Image (cartoon, rainbow, N blue to C red):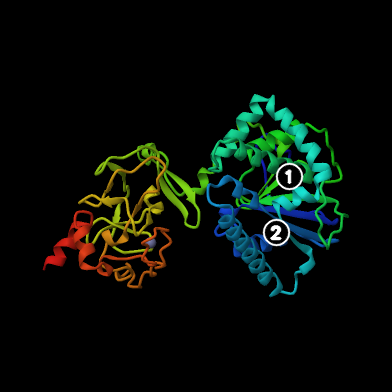
Amino acid sequence: MALETNQFFDISKLPQEEGIIFWGISMNRIGNEQSAKKCFEYLKFIDTKIKRTDGIGMVTWYSDYLYFLSDEKAHVLRDRYKELMMQHKHGFLDLILKDNVWIKKAFSFYTFGQVILDNSEIYKSAYDKIYNIYKNDVTFQEYVDFDCKKGNHGLEEKEKIFILEEIVTIYLAAKGQLNFNNRFIQGTEQWVLQLYPGRSLKSEIYLFQLNPLKLFNPKNKFENSFYDLKHKVLYDYTRIDIDTFDFSEKDDLNIDFEQEKDNLLRVEIKNIEGKGKGLITKKDFKKDEVVFEVIGNTITYATDYTIPINETEKVEPRLSKSIAQYMNHSCEPNIYPSKDGRKYLAMKYVEQGEELVTNYAFLGFNFGEEKTINGKEPKKINSNCHCGFKNCKGKITAYNDLIDDEKEKYKDFVLPFLNIKKKL
Ligand SMILES: [Zn+2]
C-alpha cells in the first residue's frame, strides 16, 4: 500500500548491510527523556528491528554547544556539561556491558563540536553556502524561528546559528558526507539513520526538501529520513507537506485542551531543566489573582499526583486531564490554593515566564498516610526537593514538617482544615 502525504509507519526491519545509527543528545533532556537508562531502552527497542546483519555502529552526539546559549559563566557550564556527558556515557556503557550481546566498540561518543571539527573540510564550506541561502530565504528564516521557539531557545542570532549548524550536520550525515569515526563500522556503512525521541525540526525538513547542495546518496535508503523513537515513526521528509504537517507535541501532554482552554490563556506547560514538565506563566499576576483552576471530579483516595481539595476529597489531575498535574513543589512557593481548594492564586506579584510552584505543605498534614480505595498504601512522594532555591530544605515538606514560625507565616495560604485542626 502506498503511503500518502504526511502518512508514516514504523520501520519493520533495518537493512542487513552495514550501517550507522546516530542520535543527538540534547543537554536539557540528558536527565529525563534521554537519560542513559532511557537510551538503553530505546536501544533494546531498536534491536527488535534488526534481523541478521553485517553490523551496525551507534554514534552518540552530545550537543554541548548549547552552553553558548546561556548567561551562566563558561567554567560553570563546562564543568556541569562535562560531568553530565561523562555520567551519561558511563551509565549507558555500564548497561550495555552487563549484557554480552553488545559489542563495545560499536558504540562511539562525541560532542557536537568534535563532529564539526572532525569534518571541518566538508563542513565549513557546506555551512557557509547554506547560511547564505538562509540569509536570503524568508521561509527558511521563519522555520528556524519556529524551531527556536519550540525548543525554548531564545530568538537571538546565536540560537538561530545553533539550529542551522545542527541541521546542516544532520543533512551532511544523511547524504554520506561525514566521517563517523566508529571503530566497528569504519567508513563502510551502506546506510545511516538519525534517531531522536520526538518530532523533527521544521527547518530540517525544509533543508532536506530544498537540498541546496544537490547532494544525493541513493545507496543510503534513509537519505531523506529520520526515526522518531518516541512516537515510533520513520519519517520520509520527501512525503511531508510542511504547511499541513502537525509539528505539535500535543499528544505528549495528558491534558484536555478544550476543557483547559481558559487556564491555557494564562499558563503554559514547558520542560524545565532537571524537573520534567512544569507550569509557566504567560502573563504577570498581581497578589491573590487567580492563576488557574483545578478541573476534575473528586475522589477520596490518594496517589502521587492527587491534589487535595479539602480534608477528604482530592482531584487526580491525570484522570481529569487537568494542567494541575504539572504543578511542582518548591520551598519558595508563589501560588497557594483557594479556600475551596479549586483555584490557585498568586502569593505575591508573579511575572510572565516564571514557573508556578506551590508548597505541598499547604495541602496536607503528611504524605502517604491516606489509604487508597483498596486499602493499600499509596506510594510515598519522592521526598527529595529539587526546587533550586538557596534556602531549599532538600526534601518536600508536608504541613507537619513545618516549624511553628512557618505555620504562622503560611496560615493564609494553607487549606483551611490544616489551620482548624492545628487549633484543636
Ligand atoms: Zn526545595
Quarter of the rendering occupied by the N terminus = top right
Pointer 2 residue: 46
Label 1 lies in ligand 1 vicinity (Cβ under 8 Å): no
* Cα gap from disc 1 to disc 2, whole angstroms: 20 Å
Residue 170 image label: 1
Q: Position of residue 12 (x, y in %)?
A: 73, 53
Camera-side residue: 215 or 87?
87
Is 325 placed above or below 84 here?
above
Q: Which element is circle 1 on? A: helix
Local crowd at mark 2 within 10 Å, few (<14), some, or many (≥20)? some
Label tally: 2
Q: Which element is circle 2 on? A: helix
Quarter of the rendering occupied by the C terminus = bottom left
Q: Nearer the viewer, mark 1 or mark 2?
A: 1
User: Could you tell me the amino acid type at mark 2?
Assistant: Ile
Q: Is residue 39 left or right of residue 344?
A: right
User: Residue extending furthest right?
Assistant: 188
Q: Are marks 1 and 2 in contact (CB under 8 Å)?
A: no
Q: Residue at x 77, y 49 (%)?
A: 117
Local crowd at mark 1 within 10 Å, few (<14), some, or many (≥20)? many
Q: Is residue 269 left or right of residue 403?
A: right
Q: Earlier in the sequence, mark 1 or mark 2?
A: 2
Q: Is residue 214 left or right of residue 400?
A: right
Is 310 placed above or below 268 here?
below
Residue 93 image label: none
In the figure, residue 300 lies in which quadrant?
bottom left
Q: Position of residue 211 (x, y in %)?
A: 77, 33
User: Could you tell me the amino acid type at mark 1?
Assistant: Ile
